[in-house]
Image: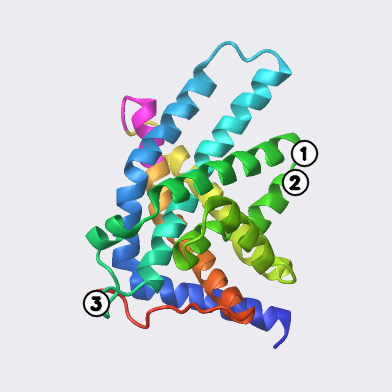
Amino acid sequence: MSRRAELVSVYARIGRTYVRWAPSLLLLAFVVFVPLGLVHAITIQADTGSPDFEGSFKLVAAATALVATGLIGEVFYAGAVAISLTRPHDGHPPSLREIAGMIEYRRLIAVDMVFAVLVAAGLVLLFVPGVLAFVWLGLAAPVVEIEHTGVRAAFARSMRLVRGRFALVAAVLIPIEILGDGLTDLATHFTHGLFGSELLCDWLADLLANLAFTPFYAVACVLLTVDLIREKGGDAELHSQPAA
């Protein structure tokens, strides 16, 4: 199979999986991004509203904080989706309550935070290192939940899975992330003025964008992780059907 055909096939599977699992994916996204959207909105308001924006260090720190809080949640959500799509419970996909009991919270939150800071710092300071970190480390969260690894082991495993398949992983994850960021900006533009509070507008925009696009990112991460684990001799598979 040519690279183009493989890429088209992966995107087609992402779309089919999203449609099949949409109700549970959206419900899980709502639970995750209602509180995290507020955190992101507060960060935006704090950084854009602060008059003390002089000095390159403060500018870089503020920009890094904005990018990092924008990424936080996506990785944790991808790990939760990995449970939903790959881990059966009594022969059936787990319910939302069961997922909540299965999540490796400490490990997944640590992966989420480290990933967000590394990517954000790399993007703000030199850009290319941030892109490389986004691709090489992007499968760590599903690895935590599929293979039950620790934080450092998950990042190392992500790099081993991506090795030799960097172009495919980049061609899937980067466009989805860019489109998601664009959707967030668009949602922010249209929601401003709907309410008297800019904080509420930013919160709503962030929530709507994450509900619309983050499930695609999470499904893409999980599908790629499962495919690459199997390609490299490991054991992983998706459920054929979502939970009722």
Tell me residue 21's x, y (percent): 34, 71
Between 145 and 150, the residue placed more toward the observer is 150
What number is the disc on residue 12? Answer: none
**Which kind of residue does numbered mark 3 sit on?**
Asp
Tell me residue 40's x, y (percent): 45, 35
Q: Residues within 10 Å of mark 1 (few under 14, many from 20)?
A: few
According to the picture, the residue beneath numbered tag 2 turns out to be 129
Q: Residue at x 52, y 63 (%)?
A: 143
Between 60 and 81, the residue placed more toward the observer is 81
Q: Residues within 10 Å of mark 2 (few under 14, many from 20)?
A: some
What's the magenta region?
Answer: 195-205
The reply to whether the C-beta atoms of the residues labelled 1 and 3 are less than 8 Å apart is no
According to the picture, the residue beneath numbered tag 3 turns out to be 90
- Nearest to viewer (mark 2 / mark 3): 3
The tag earlier along the polypeptide, 1 or 3, is 3
Residue 232, by quadrant, is: bottom right
The reply to whether the C-beta atoms of the residues labelled 2 and 1 are less than 8 Å apart is yes
Tell me residue 235's x, y (percent): 51, 79
- Nearest to viewer (mark 1 / mark 3): 3
According to the picture, the residue beneath numbered tag 1 turns out to be 126
Secondary element at tag 3:
loop
Between 202 and 25, the residue placed more toward the observer is 25
The correct choice, above or below, for 121 with respect to 136 in the image is: above
Which quadrant of the rendered structure holds the C terminus? bottom left
